[in-house]
Amino acid sequence: MAVDDYFSLFGLPARFGLDEEALEHAWREVAAQVHPDRYATASAVERRVAMQWAARVNEAYRQLRNPLLRARYLCEQAGVDLQTESNTAMAPAFLMQQMEWREMLDDARRDAKTAAALRAELDAAQAGMRKQVCELLDGRRDYAAAAVRVREWLFIDKMEQELAALRPA
Amino acid sequence: MALLQISEPGESPAPHQRRLAVGIDLGTTNSLVAAVRSSVAEVLPDAQGRALLPSIVQYLPDGRTPTGYEAQAQQTADSRNTVVSVKRFMGRSLAEAQASGAPYEFVDAPGMVRLRTVQGDLSPVEVSAQILAVLRQRAEDVLGDDLVGAVITVPAYFDDAQRQATRDAARLAGLNVLRLLNEPTAAAIAYGLDNAAEGVYAVYDLGGGTFDISILRLSRGVFEVIATGGDTALGGDDFDAVIVERVLADLPAGHDLTPGDRRALMVTARAVREALSDRETARYALTLADGRELARDIARTEFEAWAQPLVERTLHSARNALRDAKLAVSDVRGVVMVGGSTRMPLVRRAVGALFGTEPLVDLNPDEVVALGAALQANLLAGNRAPGEDWLLLDVIPLSLGLETMGGLVERVIPRNSTIPVARAQEFTTFKDGQTAMSVHVVQGERELVSDCRSLARFELRGIPPMVAGAARIRVTFQVDADGLLSVTAREQSTGVEAAVTVKPSYGLSDEEIARMLSDSVREADSDAQARMLREQQVEARQLAESVRAALVNDADLLSDGERAAVDAALQGADAVAASDDVEAVRAAVQALSSATEEFAARRMDRSIRKALAGRKLDELA
């Protein structure tokens, strides 16, 4: 059936470049159709199936809404496994960069200025990744090359999360 | 109901088929029941015209259980057997209950604490069920018919154990739970539908024993919760306790307080707190059991200074929720105030200052949750009129995860994920030849398992012996629209599977509830028995009919073997349809249901796929 992948579920083209408003609009419409509230007085089996669909729709939305997860999903759909567990090979330049950021992160614990500088660098790196991955996926359709970038992007994202967690609660 | 009738979403039954459904606010201090009548939601009063039912149950030696105002009148005279604020103990352990300082004799029991009364040791679930049963009776008296179901509200910040306990209580009270609905979300429905509100709103809900803050986006009939936060052990009771603490400081030491004293101290404190919402000073006056007298004037400013730290805790939660929502204070268009405790001027001022806007108080803060629940119940029962429609997208309040090596938590579903949600995570064995893996499910935001709430433990056995790291065990978490979790674990290469609905350590098992309910039916008279037989016969006929209808269109979904099994079960149902052996009819219905369960699931799946594919055609047109 035509609703088996996340993009067609929302009636959107399977591209990295995405109209976020159209996605949100489609999510609300599809979620409304399968939401368990629509089947509250139906049988247990029907409620279960509706609930599974609703969970799937929410998961699809979560993955497509987030550019990094969306890129990863597109790679996987194209049959390129990111091997996030087993393949940790990185370009030497990126490894160097990563070490530099690690040191900044350590300093950021004590120094708000370093934290701000690191945040700016990571934001810029994320934006750069986004642009490169968009070109690789939508332009050249080179999924293997995109997967390499996505692996790096995952590191940047993780670093950004660690930085955010430093903020006092 | 017939198993195979695929209901058409959005269908409104004819007026004579209108299905009665109510919303119930099961509160710490007071409970209410409301229903939509003549398209307006209203609270259903008792025979004396009172809307509130104090959430108080007294257990008498003769087996009677006065509930509400009658029990309230006895709360200081018979404090051990008169249970107040039972909501605070739902899904909680002995240690947590004792920490509350409430004057009961608590008894340890597996999973959830029990309260010792003259009628034996009772779980908080049973006490809550008594309150719900009274509200159910009230609704059936006022509405004049049986209920098809109820929406029960819970604090948004309730964890899985507390939600399970609430649902168990409702089922024990004989209620069909259409949905557990978060209290602030219920309030947002009542408020939003009344005011045709659009934009981001905060709901600040300070009740008798719980505090919730929810940030919602309201737009074109969608109520989307973006973030929620709170404290399930912070409410009006705590403000009263602050007063008691100060008053007792004046008292010479050396005398013990009786349980009745402690209850009376709290009751008086509440009266003083409520009086201070309207007046600048109020007098605290009480004579203790041993004749000592307490008397003291308390100024509002004085009370506000004492209570400031409690209010600050709520503001802290509110700021965190905003941060989770990635929103600034200025993005919030309005703050809806819910719960009787928001009548305190201190609270209104503080909330107004934080959000930079006058809090919205035009709906009665005691009733707004029940009214929203009634609107939702009416919607879920399928009574909505054309054009009157909305959708709720709620979230889970606390992250769900698993214990991994070293007592650390691996988060599987982060808090504020839209529900329903399903997420899987893969794990592996860490020893050569390991054939079992224990799965420990926890809820909370901390990194250490010991700082989170333990929800369930179960074992996946029968993993074939492999080298360490070779097995691929996929653990799937699924949270339904009630916010209730179920977990399955599956070894991918062999398909060995283990599943658990998270409840064994808290609340009642399905069997326990079924037994308690069937005990009460067995006692009923022969009229009830006859009615049950008729109902079973009708169900057998309806089910067989709908299976035959389904086979006409969708027989292609079944293999030959499956079709033969369905046909056999159909013949079995036909054979006993006219029998007066209620058990035989019930067994045949059961057999037909289970024989067609997978068929029903596939038909539902096909129907949803068709609906979704149709949506796209509409868009193209």
Image (tube, grey):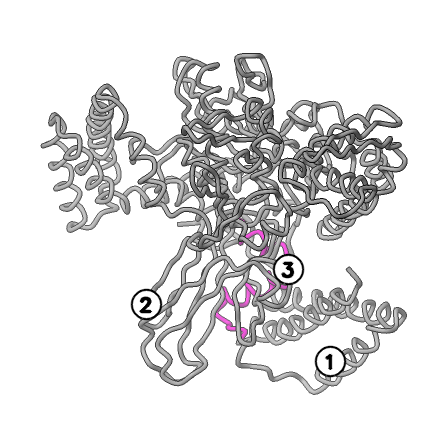
Amino acid type, residue under disc 1 in the picture: Gln
The magenta span reads A56-82
Q: Chain of mark 3?
A: B
Which of the two discs, 2 and 1, sits closer to the camera? 2
Residue A93 position, x and y percent, is 73, 85
Residue A13 position, x and y percent, is 56, 53
Query: Which residue is under mark 2?
Result: B496
Image position of A105 with respect to A12: above or below = below
Query: Which residue is under mark 1?
Result: A98
Q: Earlier in the sequence, mark 2 or mark 3?
A: 3
Q: Is residue A167 magenta?
A: no
Q: Secondary structure at mark 1?
A: helix
Amino acid type, residue under disc 2 in the picture: Val
Q: Is the residue marked by circle 1 packed among few (<14), some (14-19), or many (20+) residues within 10 Å? A: some
Query: Which residue is under mark 3?
Result: B445
Amino acid type, residue under disc 3 in the picture: Glu
Q: Secondary structure at mark 3?
A: loop
Q: Main secondary structure of the magenta part?
A: helix
Distance Cα–Cα, label 2 vs label 3: 31 Å
